[in-house]
Amino acid sequence: MPLHDDVKRLIDGPNFAHLATVMADGSPQVAPVWVSREGDRILIGTSSTSLKARNAGRDPRVALSVIDFANPYEEAQIRGRVVEQRRDPELRTKDAVSRKYTGAPFPWRDPATSVTLVVEVDRVKYAKLPFRHTPGGTSA
């Protein structure tokens, strides 16, 4: 599914996402993740031994939410499938994404287990709500 430019901008920025996968018993599991993009596919770096990679290997259905770091009322809700667990022994994807979020290469180096989850998007909902984020402020 082609991604709208607003969704691409959210994914391309240093915005946190939450990835939901399905446990063996059918219950959801959610983890905060860094994300990047390859065309209209979403990339998530992880370890092949991580719970998210094991869950996606058994059941490829996933969901993501991405919010704008500067404006948490701008968001994308995404459903899709992990269509590939791409080996990343040189940590090229992880390093690029880590630089986007932290300005430095990924610190935990395990070439033997480094993989990139490649998500093919099935559905997307984008919203920009008319609120201002003013925690602790007074209500009008």
Image (tube, rainbow, N blue to C red):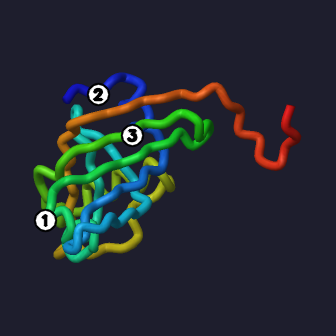
Q: Residues within 10 Å of mark 3 (few under 14, many from 20)?
A: some
Residue closer to the observer: 70 or 74: 74
Q: Residues within 10 Å of mark 2 (few under 14, many from 20)?
A: some
Indicate whether 134 appears above or below 18.
Answer: above
Residue kind at label 3, given as amino acid type: Gln
Indicate whether 39 appears above or below 31.
Answer: above
Give the CA separation, mark 1 to mark 3: 22 Å
Q: Residue at x 23, y 33 (%)?
A: 40
First of labels 2, 3 by sequence position: 2
- Reading the image, the residue beneath label 1 is 57
Q: Residue at x 22, y 57 (%)?
A: 116
At numbered mark 3, what does the secondary structure look like: helix, strand or loop? strand
Point out residue 120 in the picture as x, y percentages from the top left corner: 18, 42
Which numbered circle lies on residue 118? Answer: none
Viewport quadrant of the C terminus: top right
Indicate whether 103 appears above or below 52.
Answer: above
Which numbered circle lies on residue 77? Answer: 3
Q: Residues within 10 Å of mark 1 (few under 14, many from 20)?
A: some
Residue kind at label 2, given as amino acid type: Leu
Q: Residue at x 19, y 62 (%)?
A: 56
First of labels 2, 1 by sequence position: 2
In the image, taking residue 72 as reference, residue 138 lies left or right, namely: right
Give the CA separation, mark 2 to mark 3: 12 Å
At numbered mark 1, what does the secondary structure look like: helix, strand or loop? helix
Point out residue 86 in the picture as x, y percentages from the top left corner: 13, 57
The answer to whether the residue labelled 2 contacts the one labelled 1, judged by CB atoms less than 8 Å apart, is: no
Residue closer to the observer: 93 or 73: 73
Indicate whether 126 appears above or below 111.
Answer: above
Point out residue 127 in the picture as x, y percentages from the top left corner: 48, 29
Quadrant in the picture for residue 38 = top left
- Reading the image, the residue beneath label 2 is 3
